[in-house]
Image (tube, rainbow, N blue to C red):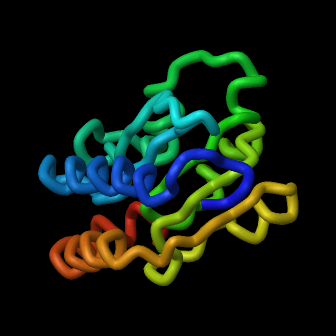
Amino acid sequence: MTSSSSFDDKKGMQIALDQAQKSYSEGGIPIGGCLIKSDGTLLSSGHNQRVQKGSAILHGEMSVLENAGRLPASVYLDCTMYTTLSPCLMCTGAILLYGIKRVVVGENETFMGGEALLKEHGVEVVNLNDDGCKQILQKFIEEKPQCWNEDIGV
């Protein structure tokens, strides 16, 4: 936990990981996330639904934003996006577009997304290097490598 948030990052990541597990149990890519205000209010959670909905864009972070609905721009400034995996460039762009100032990543060994771009734009990025996040994604990649490669644009 850093001084910019009064919420426990491990609790936020557990919500995100629960969402990743939900996606996995649905046959989808196990990446999850949530959006939490600095006072600990959970605004939304979501998970990758590209497989389940045949979507080109419903990555974990995009699902979180979709589930949050329309919010005033000022709300995003006081939020942390939790995501089980380093956000890809599409999700990085959405985080920047909505002015989210803090992103907590479960891990970035399996995939390194746009963390440098986030930092360049003043976003605080925290990597928890979480074993649970790594394990569920590695299991999925071993089981469905073509689906994983499609998700990351390979």
Total labels: the figure holds 0
Horizontally, is 20 left or right of 79 in the view? left
Q: Position of residue 58 (x, y in %)?
A: 43, 42
- Of 53 and 91, nearer the camera is 91
- Locate the N terminus and report the quarter of the image it occupies: bottom right
- Of 53 and 26, nearer the camera is 26
Answer above or below: position of 110 versus 35. below
At 49% from the left and 83% from the top, the residue drawn is: 109
Q: Where is residue 81 in the image (x, y as percent from the top left)?
A: 57, 47
Q: Position of residue 49 (x, y in %)?
A: 32, 43
* Residue 95 found in image quarter: top right
Horizontally, is 41 left or right of 124 in the view? left
At 73% from the left and 55% from the top, the residue drawn is: 3
Answer above or below: position of 37 versus 101. above
Q: Where is residue 26 in the image (x, y as percent from the top left)?
A: 14, 47
- Of 102 and 56, nearer the camera is 102
Answer above or below: position of 74 versus 138. above
* Residue 67 found in image quarter: top left
Answer above or below: position of 32 versus 114. above
* Residue 20 found in image quarter: bottom left
